[in-house]
Each structure stands twice: as structure tokens, then as C-alpha cells.
Image (cartoon, grey):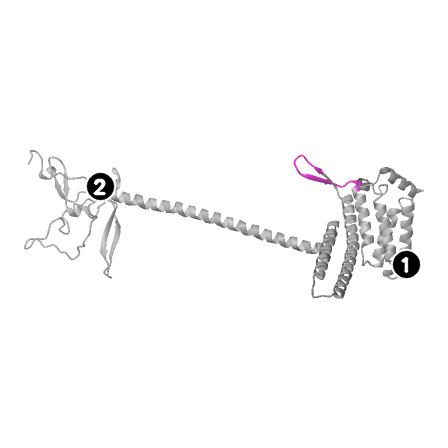
Amino acid sequence: MEEGKEYFEQIETEDHVIPNFYELKVVGADGQEKVLTVEVEKATQEMPYLGGYRSKKTAAQYLHAGSNTDQYRKEYKEKLTREVQTYQYRTRSTKMHREMGSQMDKTGVVFVDPREDKAVDSQPYFDSEMWLEQRQRATLFIQRNVRGWFARKRAAALRQERDSRDRLILEREEEMRKREEENHEKEIQRRLNPKSQEDFSTLYKELNAYRLKETERIKSRTDWSSEKKQLGLKELLHKETKLLQTIDRLKITAAHQNREERIKQLLGDMAAPKRFKRPDGRVTEVHTLFSTRAKELMDLYHGLKMPMLTIDERLDVLLHTKWTVKEFDCNLSREIVDLIDREADMLNRGRPEGSLDGLRKRLANLFLQFIETPEFNPEAARFQKVPEELVQSALELNFS
């Protein structure tokens, strides 16, 4: 033993850091072993001296085991107060109520009651190699999860791209199918209700192809006699004649419909407001005096063409039309006024609607001619396709 040192001072010890958690293995009632995590509450203040040994040379304290359990807190009051000065002090013994310490059981000498003892499994020894191995396992675990996350994101993106591509393909196929159906329906309507010259050319071509095909078929029949072939060609000619008559009727109907559509489009263009594009890209619509006049004339024309009107409504339309055309004194306006008076007289006498069809058609045509004249409708000058000299000569003839 070295000179001047106690025995306990010569013992070499390692600094031990109390962990924050302990893992304990506990066997439950069902015999299964469980691992419980116990949190360690560390003391935040210096343990009070409740007994033990103190070195007189080094002033080191060696406490009893019992002093490390229950924490005794002594509340110190402020000094120099009446409460402190009049406090009744008592002397307490440091003797423990129960023997505590690290004394082991010894037969015939010391008996320690083991009934309240508990077996505690401490954490096994953890060296640097085990720590590196644990870090490696944790690193591999993190890498696996991150790579799996990246893989799942990539797979989700690929699936979304595939679904978008498939959806786009389906949409295109559906659009092509609808377009084909629309084209097929349009071709059928072109043959059932032809309107343009191209539609009628298609009908004539198909009729000619049908005639040639049927003629070839009839002439190539070897089991028919010459008389039967002549009869077949005669029936084919009769059928071709019927089809040509049907095409001619469709032509008349299409011409009437096209004329009505052209008139409606022309009147709408005359009554449309002027459109001016502003510097900011917006469009401003302006109604001029000429466009307002054209719109009033268009409404009157539609009123004259409107069917199923009562007598009072028809007379009201005729009266407004008469006031409009009487502003100008010419042959056209006088003829329109004469037709209006004639129809009003027939309506007052109770004539049937069927007997007035011809009169009303003539009145509508004359009023349309009135609308298309730039002298009466200045907006019509933009849609004239004849030379100005002819228009002036026609106006002079009307006003003469």
C-alpha cells in the first residue's frame, strides 16, 4: 500500500456512464419471455450525506448503500427572518431504520431476507466491434428502405406513364371510331338529303356505276334467253328513270333549302354588329345605324315568313311592313303596299290560309328585294355582286 493513501483510493476504477434505458427480460405468466424497456431517472442534484465514512485526510465520502435509494430533500429557509430565528431545531439520528448495504448472506452470521428480491438482467457487455456491427446493420436497414422507396416511386411513375399512354391510345381509338361513325352518317345523309353540287355528282356517279354493274350482270347470264335479257334491261331502265326522277325532286328540295339558308345567312350578316379588335386583344362590338336598320328589316322579313300566326298578329306584321316601305315612293314599294292591302282585305273577309300562299310568297320575295336594295338598306351595299351602274339604272327605273 502506498504511503499516505487509503485502500479505496488506490483501487483503479473506470468511469461508468449510467445509460438512459435498460432492457430487461421478464417471463410472463404464460411462460413467454418479454423484453421491457425501463427508463432510468438520473439524479439532478448531489445526494445528501445520510451516513457512511468520511476520509479525514482527503475529505472523500463513502456512503452506505441505503443512502443511494431514497432521496432526502431538505428545504432550507431564508436566513435572518423571524421564522428561521424562532425555528425549533431537533437532532435526528443518522441510524437507518433497517440495515442496508452490500452485505451478502452468510450462513450462521448474517441472514438477508430474499423474499422481496428481484432478479434483474443487466445489458450484456457491448464492445466496439458489436457497436460497429450494430451500426452496419442499421445502415443496411436504412439503405434497403430508401432503395425500396426509390424503387416504389419509380414503379409508380412507370405505371402512371403506362396508364396515361393506354388511356391516350383508347381516347384516340374512340375519337377515330366516332369520326368514322360521323363520316359514315354524313355520307348516308348526303345520299338521303343531298344539298351541294358535289352530293348530286356523287349520286349520279353511283347511279351510273349501278347501271353498268347491273347491265353487265344481265348480259353475262347464260341461263337467260335473249327475250328475258331484254326484259331485264327494260326493268333496269325503268328503275334508273325512277331514280333520276327522285334525284331531280331532291334537287328541287335542296335548291329551296339552300336558298332559304343563303337568305338567312345574308340577313344575319347584314344585321351583325361591327367588330373592332382592341390593342389588348379583346373585341368590341358596335351597332351602327345601318346595322340597326338591317336588323329591323330582317325581323320584318322573318315575321312575314312565320307560319301559324293569328289574324291579329299577321295584320300587325303587315302594318309594320307597310309603314316601313312607305318611307320610299317607288314602283317596288307601291307594289308591296298593294299586296299588303290585298292580303289584309282577304284576311278581314275570312279567306282560308291555303288560298293566300301564293300572295304571301310574292310579298316575301318583293320585300326581300326591298331589303337587298342599298337605297333602302345601306348595309346591303357591301353584299352586292352586280356593277354599281346596273344598280343605279334599276333604282332609276323603280323611282320613275
Residue farthest along the top direction in this orientation:
3
Q: Is residue 284 magenta?
A: yes
**Residue 193 seen in render:** no
Which residue is labeled 1 in the image? Answer: 346
Q: Residues within 10 Å of mark 1 (few under 14, many from 20)?
A: some
Task: Name the residue nearer the viewer: 146 or 192.
Answer: 192
Quarter of the figure that contains the C terminus = top right
Question: Mark 1 falls on what kind of element?
Answer: helix
Q: Residue at x 31, y 43 (%)?
A: 139
x, y (%) of residue 53? 12, 42
**Bounds of the magenta segment:** 276-290
- Of 85 and 181, the residue lying toward us: 181
Please provide percent x and percent y for residue 58. Answer: 12, 35
264 left or right of 38 in image: right
From what the image shows, is residue 343 above or below residue 82?
A: below
- Where disc 2 sits, the SS reads helix
- The quadrant of the rendering that contains the N terminus is top left
Q: How far is the residue under mark 1 from the one under mark 2?
A: 121 Å
Whichever of callouts 1 and 2 sits on the residue coming sooner in the sequence is 2
- Seen at 34% across and 46% down, the residue is 144
Q: Which mark is residue 198?
A: none
User: Is 280 covered by the magenta stretch?
Assistant: yes
**Amino acid found under the numbered disc labelled 1:** Met
Q: Residue furthest right?
A: 400
Figure quadrant of residue 46: top left
Which amino acid type is marked by label 2? Answer: Ser
Question: For this rendering, which residue is in front, 13 or 395?
Answer: 395
Q: Is 136 on the left-hand or right-hand side of 146?
A: left
Residue displayed at 87% across by 56% down = 358
| Residue 166 position within the rendered picture, expressed as x and y whole percent measured from the top left | 51, 50
Circle on res. 128: 2
Left or right of residue 171: residue 19: left
